[in-house]
Amino acid sequence: SAEEDEAGAEGRWRAVPPLRLPPHQTAFAMTVHKAQGSEFDRVLLLLPAQAGRVLTRELLYTGVTRAREAVVVCGSEDVVADAVAAPTRRRSGLLARLHGMVVVR
């Protein structure tokens, strides 16, 4: 109905004139990496359409924990489940570097 279009249906995006927004801190877009160490009252975490190597449990955790009051995660349940099941595998080469550098006395 026309009334529903004007009010916005549950679960649908709608345009809001900037002057009608409450006071807020503007951030056009920020990566989770860039947001590390920061907190915001509310966070919108936009996930990719498909899971990939970059989206890991740790990245999802970091994104979610940037929010003090509320977080909205936009992504499919499958992508979230894949991220939760994908811990970061670090390949720093530390062991190999230490093997060649450490002197035991």
Image: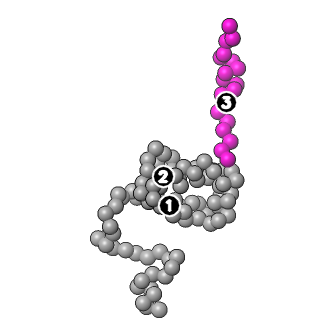
Q: Secondary structure at mark 3?
A: loop
Whether the magenta-drawn stretch holds residue 67 is answered as no
Disc number placed over residue 66 in the picture, else none: 2
Depth-wise, is mark 1 or mark 3 nearer the camera?
Answer: 1
Q: Secondary structure at mark 1?
A: strand
Q: Residue at x 65, y 65 (%)?
A: 77
Q: Secondary structure at mark 2?
A: loop
Residue type indicated by callout 1: Val
Task: Give the quadrant of residue 29.
Answer: bottom left
Q: Indicate left or right for 97 with 20 as reference.
A: right
Residue at the disc numbered 1: 71
**Boundaries of the magenta span:** 87-105
Whether the magenta-drawn stretch holds residue 90 is answered as yes
Task: Residue 53 in the image: state x and y as whole percent.
Answer: 66, 50
- Residue 17 in the image: above or below residue 62: below
Task: Residue 17 in the image: state x and y as whole percent.
Answer: 33, 73
The tag earlier along the polypeptide, 2 or 1, is 2
In contact (CB < 8 Å): disc 3 and disc 2: no
In contact (CB < 8 Å): disc 2 and disc 1: yes
Residue at the disc numbered 3: 93
